[in-house]
Image (spheres, rainbow, N blue to C red):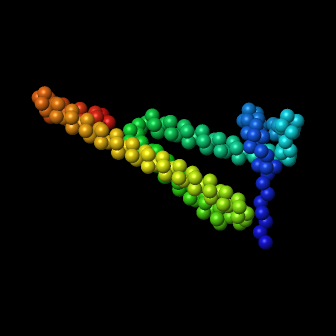
Amino acid sequence: MTAVARRSKIDQQPDEIRAQIDRLLIKAGFAGYDWLTQRIRDELGADVGGSSGLQRYGSKLQRRLAAIKASTEAARMISEAAPDEADDRSNAIISLVQTEIFDALLAMQEAEEETNPAKKVEVLGKAAKNIATLTRASVTRNKWAAEVRVKLDAAAAAIKQIGTQAGISADTMAAIDARLQGLV
């Protein structure tokens, strides 16, 4: 018989209480766990167990926030260094999120600790909803990109025709075309 991992006392708190705990941890700089444990009991009326449990929870939260901050900074740096007019990064991000959801679903199926069928159905339902949202976003983004490409090609053809009629040199037209394509 396998043991089922117990959820921490903090994870068992209502969402509003956990959100307040998260804010307190962030405001305290993830330090002073004895004091924070007492403050949570006094101000929120929540039993979070001992300070070691709060510290474990705080460490997980701190890692998640650091990962989000690093991802956001990396995305900002990439956007500045390599503008993405065709929005290829969005497609890559959507694919990455879809892969992560798929991997999480596989891990959930293999996890022995989650034996509650109703909970599995709930998680699968949420995952299906998120996958559908991602798929719609991907389809919408691809449709938008195709429409932009058609408009750009039509504008380039019209400009080329106007340039030819006006007697603009082939080199100048090539430079204009390169500018339109975002190559310059």
What residue appears at the point 65 percent right and 44 percent down from the top-left corner? 64
In the rendered image, is residue 175 in sight? no
What residue appears at the point 74 percent right and 32 percent down from the top-left corner? 27
Residue 32's place in the image compared with 53, above or below, is above
Residue found at the far bottom of this picture: 1
Residue 149 lies left or right of residue 82; in this view the side is left
Residue 181 lies left or right of residue 3; in this view the side is left
Q: Position of residue 30 (x, y in %)?
A: 74, 38
Residue 13 lies left or right of residue 106; in this view the side is right
Residue 104 lies left or right of residue 10; in this view the side is left
Q: Quadrant of residue 88?
A: top left
Quadrant (top left, top right, bottom left, bottom right) of the N terminus: bottom right
Residue 69's place in the image compared with 162, above or below, is below
Quadrant (top left, top right, bottom left, bottom right) of the C terminus: top left
Residue 14's place in the image compared with 127, above or below, is above
Q: Position of residue 71 (x, y in %)?
A: 56, 42
Q: Position of residue 170 (x, y in %)?
A: 15, 34
Q: Nearer the viewer, residue 50 or 46?
A: 46
Q: Quadrant of residue 107?
A: bottom right
In the rendered image, is residue 109 in sight? yes
